[in-house]
Amino acid sequence: MNSSSHSFRVLLIRPPYTRLRGIGQAPYFPLGIGSMAAVLNTLPGVTAEIYYADNPGPGDKPFVIDKEGVFATRSLAQQKYFEALDSDDHPVWAEVRSVIARFQPDMVGLSVLTPEVGSAAKITGFIKSLHPGCRIVWGGVHPTFEPEATLALPGVDFIVSGEGEVTIRELVETLQSGGDPTSIPGVIGPGTSIDSACRRPLIQSLDSVPIPDRRAVVYPDRFSPVAMGSLMHSRGCPWRCGFCSSRRFWHERVRFRSAENVMDEIRQVHRDYGIRIFTFWDDAFTIDRKLTEKLCEAILQSGIKIAWRTATRLDLLDDAMLKLMRKAGCVQMDLGIETGSPRMSELIRKDIDLDSAPETIDRANRHGIATGVFLMAGFPDETRDDLLKTYDFMKRIRPAEIVLNILDPMPGSEQFERALELNLLEQPVNYLRFPLWPDAHFVKEIEPAEFNRMIEEISAYVFRYNSSRTALIRRARPEILQLLRTDRKVLFQKAVRFTRRRFTRGPRH
């Protein structure tokens, strides 16, 4: 942890969730609070650091990546999470208290997703007991869409609504000078008009946002090269998918960084960490064809040979685009298709042609890009026939990987509102113990026992498919070929990790 004589200290935290459950997403560098740390560390008299509390510590057991987990284990994982919330003696909370005690923050900013509300509230309680005068600010997706419920939690002083870089800078400057934070657009506090606070204009140029400050992290050794290689080319999504809140969060706008600005970050990360593997976390990487082409050409002209992954939509790809992306180092591309039922695709406003999926996936395969297909089940209006159509759809496609997620409706999305309308969520919603499948059931037309039986059958197929020799080769071949050209050391490390996982897994069901 950095030592500094700066007088105003800001600790930016991503709360633990997967780490407490033992199963979930692999850790990644938190770009949102990373860019906020970069902004704050340019201010005179301010030191900002990043504590990603979900990163496993030295004494933690490696957790199971969510897509590899057996569905039946999710209930046990969520129970472990709730048990951790009920105990002050959990080792993770001891680490949290230690970080807070050493850093002595004047302000703590917590970036919170809905399932993490319980752990964020736990941390808030620790901070207020250790440092009663410390200001606690919540930001991110959950506080933006549930400001009143968030402010009602003990210890939460303010909310930063929506895009945070400009707002948090003005908030810290105001706290330093003793001014009124609730006068700042985008800040919600006691007595604030929530409607006006939520409409702060978005940043006009993303190039004006500093590159995320990766040097500000507490426990930097806990970030893998893949995690530290997180990037974003754009913010926002123009589509209207009913299960997602991104369109609303970004005020129904899409903005892009210039290719030169993205390359500045790639060069910096490569220079500082020797990283050649990157992940673009854009909602849909190829939204703007000309800008995507510019970025790919900039990567090629830079002379830095990298491997990268991203996500996009079926209707934003053709042979020319795939050829250029592969040439620029793209090795994996995730496609959010979500359902194999045309009826459900229309209801969730996915706005894609499902019949084009097999050919698009085959086209990517021919260009040497591994495709991951993301599908969902458990929509409030889904029927047994819809779910069977998704199952049949899986059998007609040949991607490198199939990922099946069960919908947990989240605030800010149309499907959350639909679940409330159908009384599938108990009101008022208890966000401290937010209900998730399989402990909760959000499908009106299918009984829980039948739904769970079908999911067990479908997930067994998904596991068999992903474990097949053909799928393994499709996943591994593009990255192996790229790493042979770019970074053989990383290739060796990944091979060792794969071998260990392959031969040390317990029995599967």
Image (spheres, rainbow, N blue to C red):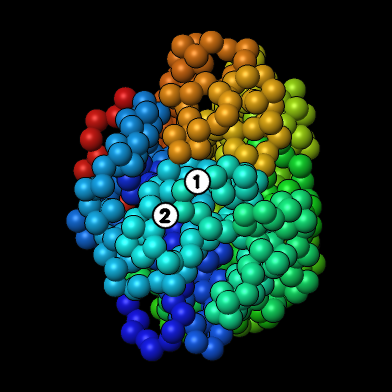
Secondary structure type for disc 2 = helix
Mark 1 surroundings within 10 Å by alpha-carbon count, few (fewer than 14), some (14 through 19), many (20 or more):
some
Vertical position of residue 140 compared to residue 275: above or below: above
The answer to whether any part of residue 180 appears in the image is yes
The answer to which of 208 and 112 lies nearer the viewer is 112
Mark 2 surroundings within 10 Å by alpha-carbon count, few (fewer than 14), some (14 through 19), many (20 or more):
many
The answer to which of 71 and 154 lies nearer the viewer is 154
In the rendering, which numbered label is found on residue 153? 1
x then y, percent, for residue 458: 48, 23
Vertical position of residue 355 compared to residue 118: above or below: above
x then y, percent, for residue 285: 67, 58
Residue shown at 49%/82% (left/top)? 46
The residue beneath circle 2 is 124
| Amino acid type shown at disc 1 | Leu
| Amino acid type shown at disc 2 | Thr
Total numbered labels placed on residues in the image: 2
Secondary structure type for disc 1 = loop
Residue shown at 48%/65% (left/top)? 135
x then y, percent, for residue 85: 33, 42
Residue shown at 50%/33% (left/top)? 430
Please state, as top left, top right, bottom left or bottom right, where the N terminus lies in the image: bottom left
